[in-house]
Image (spheres, grey):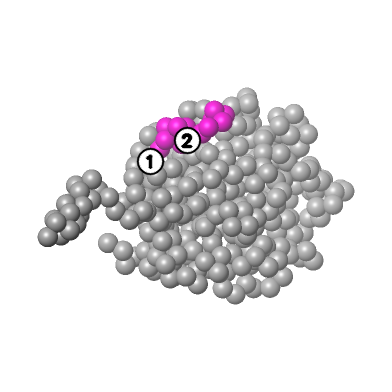
Amino acid sequence: MKTTILAGALIALGASTGIAGAADALTLQLKWVTQGQFAGYYVAKEKGYYDEADLDVTIKPGGPDVAPEQVIAGGGADVIVDWMPAALAAREKGLALVNIAQPFKASGMELTCRKETGIAAPADFKGKTLGVWFSGNEYPFLSWMSKLKLSTEGGADGVTVIKQGFNVDPLIQKQADCISTMTYNEYWQVIDAGLPADQLTVFKYEDQGVATLEDGLYTTEAKLADPAMVDKLARFVKASMKGWQYAAANPDEAAAIVLDNDTTGAQTEEHQKRMVGEVVKLVGDSDGTLDTKAAESTVAVLMGGGSDPVITKTPAGAWTSAVTDKMKTLP
């Protein structure tokens, strides 16, 4: 009798104090440092959307020395934010990455040039010096140059490529005629450095027909073989897209949340507000579902690299709707 009473008391105590099973742990590796580019995830964590989905999410910032593909390959993350060109290149080399969701519908990549160089159209690139990011970010650029039939080895009939750091110095210091920028980041750094928009010529990859998918969510085939992980990822994607929707409706608050999570103190309020405002345009009305036609277009761009394509064969199994299909069944 006493045992029964004690058991009942313990059950009641558990109910009154909210004792329950631990939330499912999940680690997200970002492609770059803490900034507005990833606002949706930080908002989802701050607003409790992950908690509501019974998830304990750890968000790991990236940086110049962090390759998301290597992190997940080494077991340091369950899901990563990556660009499809880098993910497909890694897949062809043996790392079985799979796109499970695509928050970004459009590409933010562009080439920003000083107008005084005389560059008014892509044909004018010939003989010019162009700054390009590497570490996997060069793939869309190389495909574009192949499409234009411009050698990247320099010379009068080609372009000279310089390896651009993650800054805009080559353009400001006139070391390059054009540099790589993102609509939400480096373009504004150029403006802030004193080059007004009317002194710039900008070529968006989207407009040139060479855009590739950016900022998708990827995991490995091995993880997707576990139904429990698929369920966990479905809850994660749903909560993350709720975070993106909130960020779109409240960009200034979202920027403030990002700043609160920036342990480096390197970000500024004005820049993060602009970044969130531009990034949510790329997300648009996405619910995370991958547009397979956009994925196929990305593959076509990457395989159009002439004698040196980014990938050599059409990938099989590089994306799945299993997670977003499961997501749509969740309450």
Question: Does the magenta portion include 176?
Answer: no
Residue 116 appears in which quarter of the rendering? top right
Picture layout, residue 26 above or below residue 39? below
Residue 288 appears in which quarter of the rendering? bottom left
Q: How crowded is mark 1: few (under 14 residues within 10 Å), some or many (20 or more)?
A: some
Segment colored magenta: 254-267
65 displayed left or right of 266: right
Q: What residue type is labelled 1?
A: Glu
Q: Which of these two is toward me, 331 or 76?
A: 76
Residue 46 - label: 1
Q: Which of these two is toward me, 219 or 23?
A: 23
Q: Which amino acid does label 2 sit on?
A: Asn
What's the residue at 76%, 37% (across, down)? 176
Residue 296 in view: no
Q: Which of these two is toward me, 241 or 226?
A: 226
Query: Residue 246 at x, y = what percent?
Result: 35, 44
Residue 261 - label: 2
Picture layout, residue 27 above or below residue 170? below
Residue pushed farthest left? Answer: 1
Q: Reading the chain from its start, which is encountered first: label 2 or label 1? A: 1
What's the residue at 79%, 46% (across, down)? 161
Asked if the residues shown at circle 2 and circle 1 are in contact, with their CB atoms under 8 angstroms apart, the answer is: yes
Query: Residue 250 at x, y = what percent?
Result: 35, 38
Quadrant (top left/top right/bottom left/bottom right) for the N terminus: bottom left
Q: Is mark 2 on a helix, strand or loop?
A: helix
What's the residue at 20%, 48% (across, down)? 13
Query: Residue 247 at x, y = what percent?
Result: 39, 42
